[in-house]
C-alpha cells in the first residue's frame, strides 16, 4: 500500500516513489507488452480521431489568443512523450518542424507512420538533456499526460524550460471537488483515479500552477476538458460501479465535444476555462510562457 500525501505545492503525490531504475524497467516492459499483444489493434473510430485532432486545435487556438507570439515563420514544435503522434501530425501538417520524444516508436508507427522520422526514442530524460546540450530551442513544447508519471515533476519542468518559449502541459484532474463529493455521496466506493505505479503525482489546478511558477514558467491560462466524471452521478451511467457502460460514456463525451467544437472553438474554450475555474473537468491543461525566451 502506497501513502499519498499533499505536498508543498498543493497537489498529491506518492510518498515513497519507485527508483529511476525500477520505473525504467517498468515502462520498458510495458512497451514490450504493448507490442507483443498488439494493444493498438482495436479499431479507433473516425469520430475519435477527429476528437483527438480537435483537442490539439482547441489548445493551440487558446494559446494563440492568450500570448503575443508569431508562430508563422518556420516554427519548431517538441512533443515530450508524444505517444500516438496526434499532436506531431497536427503541427507537421501545418508546416511546423516537429520533434517527438518517446520510449518507443510503437504507438506512433501504428497511427502516424509519417511522423516516425521525427521521433527520438529511448529514455526521455536523457534525450531532453541531449537537446539542451545542443541548445535547441522550440517555439512550443507539448507535455501531454507525462508529468504525473515522473518521479520529479519540478525537475522535468525545469528541464523543458531550457528548451522552449511556450509550454502546454496536460495532467489528470485528481482529488477534485466533484470526485470527493461523489465519494462522500456513495456514488463511488474508492479513489478510482489512483493508478500505481503509473501515476506518481495527482494534480489540481492550483498545485499545477504553483509548481510551474516555482520552475520559472509564467502561467497565461488554464483549461479543463469534458467532465466525464459527471456520468458517475447517474446510476445508469456510472462507469466505476459498472465498467460495461464506460465506453458509452466515452463516446458521449466525444460526440458532445465534436458538436461544441464545430459550433465554435472559441466558445468551447470559454466553457472549458470556466470548468477549470470550478475545479471540474477530467483533465487540466496549463498554458505557460518562458519569460526568459518568449
Image (tube, rainbow, N blue to C red):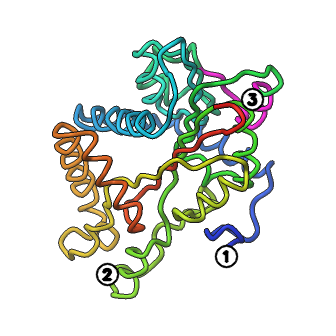
Identify which residue is drawn at 45% across, 29% down: 87
As helix, strand or loop, the secondary structure at mark 1 comes to: strand
Q: Is residue 27 left or right of residue 181?
A: right
| For discs 2 and 1, the disc positioned in front in the rendered view | 1
Q: Check the image and report above or below for 133 versus 40.
A: above
189, 138: nearer the viewer: 138
Identify which residue is drawn at 75% across, 37% down: 125
Q: What is the distance, in whole Å, between disc 1 and disc 3 at their CAs? A: 30 Å
Q: What is the distance, in whole Å, between disc 3 and disc 2 at their CAs? A: 44 Å
Residue 84 placement (x, y as % from top left): 47, 31
Identify which residue is drawn at 36% across, 53% down: 225
As helix, strand or loop, the secondary structure at mark 2 comes to: loop
Q: Which residues are magenta?
A: 119-131
Q: Which residue is mark 2?
A: 187
Q: Kindly check if marks 2 and 1 are in contact, taking CB atoms under 8 A apart as contact.
A: no
Residue 5 circle label: 1
- Which SS does the magenta portion mostly show? helix
Q: Which residue is mark 3?
A: 127
37, 139: nearer the viewer: 139
Q: Quadrant of residue 89?
A: top left
Residue 113 placement (x, y as % from top left): 46, 17
Location of the C terminus (image quadrant): top right
Amino acid at each position: 500500500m502506497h501513502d499519498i500525501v499533499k505536498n508543498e505545492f498543493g497537489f498529491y503525490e506518492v510518498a515513497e516513489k519507485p527508483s529511476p531504475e525500477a520505473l525504467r524497467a517498468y515502462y520498458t516492459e510495458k512497451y514490450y507488452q504493448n507490442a507483443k499483444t498488439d494493444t493498438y489493434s482495436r479499431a479507433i473510430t473516425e469520430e475519435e480521431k477527429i476528437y483527438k485532432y480537435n483537442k490539439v486545435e482547441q489548445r493551440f487556438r487558446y494559446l494563440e489568443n492568450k500570448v503575443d507570439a508569431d508562430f508563422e515563420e518556420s516554427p519548431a514544435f517538441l512533443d515530450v512523450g508524444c505517444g500516438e503522434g496526434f499532436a506531431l501530425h497536427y503541427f507537421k501538417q501545418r508546416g511546423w518542424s516537429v520533434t517527438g520524444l518517446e520510449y518507443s516508436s510503437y504507438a506512433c508507427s501504428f497511427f502516424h507512420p509519417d511522423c516516425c522520422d521525427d521521433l527520438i526514442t529511448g529514455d526521455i530524460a536523457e534525450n531532453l538533456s541531449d537537446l539542451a546540450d545542443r541548445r535547441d530551442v522550440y517555439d512550443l513544447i507539448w507535455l501531454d499526460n507525462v508529468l504525473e508519471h515522473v518521479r520529479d515533476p519540478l525537475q522535468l519542468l525545469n528541464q523543458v524550460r531550457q528548451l522552449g518559449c511556450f509550454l502546454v502541459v496536460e495532467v489528470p484532474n485528481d482529488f477534485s471537488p466533484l470526485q470527493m463529493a461523489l465519494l462522500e455521496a456513495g456514488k463511488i466506493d474508492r479513489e478510482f483515479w489512483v493508478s500505481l505505479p503509473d501515476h506518481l503525482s495527482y494534480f489540481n489546478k492550483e498545485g499545477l500552477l504553483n509548481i510551474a511558477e516555482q520552475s520559472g514558467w509564467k502561467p497565461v491560462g488554464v483549461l479543463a476538458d469534458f467532465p466525464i466524471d459527471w456520468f458517475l452521478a447517474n446510476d445508469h451511467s456510472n462507469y466505476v460501479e459498472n465498467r460495461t457502460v464506460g465506453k458509452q460514456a466515452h463516446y458521449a463525451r466525444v460526440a458532445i465535444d465534436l458538436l461544441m467544437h464545430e459550433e465554435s472553438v472559441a466558445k468551447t474554450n470559454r466553457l472549458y476555462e470556466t470548468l477549470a475555474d470550478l475545479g471540474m473537468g477530467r483533465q487540466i491543461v496549463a498554458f505557460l510562457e518562458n519569460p526568459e525566451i518568449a
